[in-house]
Amino acid sequence: MLDKDQFFEKYKVKKEFEQSDLSWDTLEAIYDDYCLREQEVNQCTKELEQYIRNNMQAQIHSIRCRKKDPYHLIEKIIRKRGVEQSNKYKGINVDNYREIIRDLIGVRILIFSKEEWVGVFEDILNLFESSIAHEGQWFIAEAPVAYTRYGDRDIFTDKIHVEHSNKGYRSQHYIIFFNQYYCEIQVRTLTEEVYGEFDHKVKYPYRNDNKFLVRYTTTLSQLLGSVDELISTCFQMQPEGWEQCSKYYKGDKYIDWMNISKQTDSHTHDVKESVYVDGDGKIDVGEYFNHIILRKD
């Protein structure tokens, strides 16, 4: 049972709920039904993760799966109707919520460099494109989408639908149907993951109009985008390119921190034994300042 007071204590969306056309009875019915399906959803999540792990051929960093928390499910429905006024969620009820909400199960695939998305893209198509092979139980339910920022280098060509925005979010999304549930697969680089997690912590979805956070997250997205470009360039050059470039950096020198540390320790010891301590054991602050800060003898 969904406790109304407890829910609104945890999620500050009471105003949004009142602005929506949702009834609490409907939300409670969805919550109860989803909780009853917990074991089934958990099993589907495990099977999906195992299927991808066992059959993914592309080079990736990691994979993780999760099922949506029941409270998060209700919060999302309220937000979609009360804040975003999404027509897709209009009339949502216990009979159709599993058709409308397509990320009850989520998969996150992380890659090192941006260009590696192609291999993951081809693997996902191969694993889920044919509904006949799996008797209609596994298939791609929506056209894949790549979310990018205006000004990003185009790495997607015509392989995938691209949506540009001035937001910092970057990722590729795939909606699949797997064993009676719609699932969302997200593919992104490690730095895109950093941005996505940080943005969800501080801005999305309830502080999108905060001017400070808009500026802050935009700048962070630009910096992390540059990091991705550096990583991509390095991987694209390959070991042969690294060796070719290395000759241009033969003159590079780096500070010997270990040696400096030893010198500092020795210098500190000398100061302790110096004339800046008078006969009574008191430090002459003026002399000490001249020696340590101004380096005067």
Image: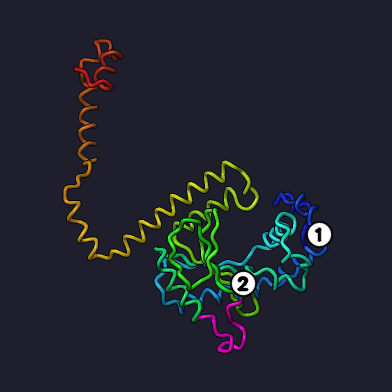
Residue 21, compared with residue 57, is above or below; it is: above
Residue positioned most to the top: 279
Query: Which of the 4 image quarters holds residue 66?
Result: bottom right
Q: CA distance from mark 1 to mark 2?
A: 31 Å
Q: Position of residue 108 (x, y in %)?
A: 52, 66
Question: Which residue is located at x 55 percent, y 76 percent?
Answer: 48
Residue 29 lies within the magenta run:
no
Residue 177, compared with residue 290, is above or below; it is: below
Q: Which residue is mark 2?
A: 42
| Nearest the eye: 190 or 168 | 168
Q: Is residue 1 left or right of residue 265?
A: right
| Element at label 1 | loop
Residue 222, compared with residue 284, is above or below; it is: below
Looking at the picture, which amino acid does disc 1 mark? Answer: Asp
Q: Is residue 68 left or right of residue 94?
A: left
Q: For the magenta stretch, what is the residue range?
A: 127-141
How many residues crowd mark 2 within 10 Å: few (<14), some (14–19), many (20+)?
A: some
Q: Are marks 1 and 2 in contact (CB under 8 Å)?
A: no
Question: Which residue is located at x 20 percent, y 61 percent?
Answer: 243
Secondary structure mostly seen in the magenta stretch: loop
Q: Which residue is mark 1?
A: 21
Q: Earlier in the sequence, mark 1 or mark 2?
A: 1
Q: Position of residue 31 (x, y in %)?
A: 74, 65
| Element at label 2 | helix
Residue 42, compared with residue 138, is above or below; it is: above
Q: Nearer the viewer, mark 1 or mark 2?
A: 1
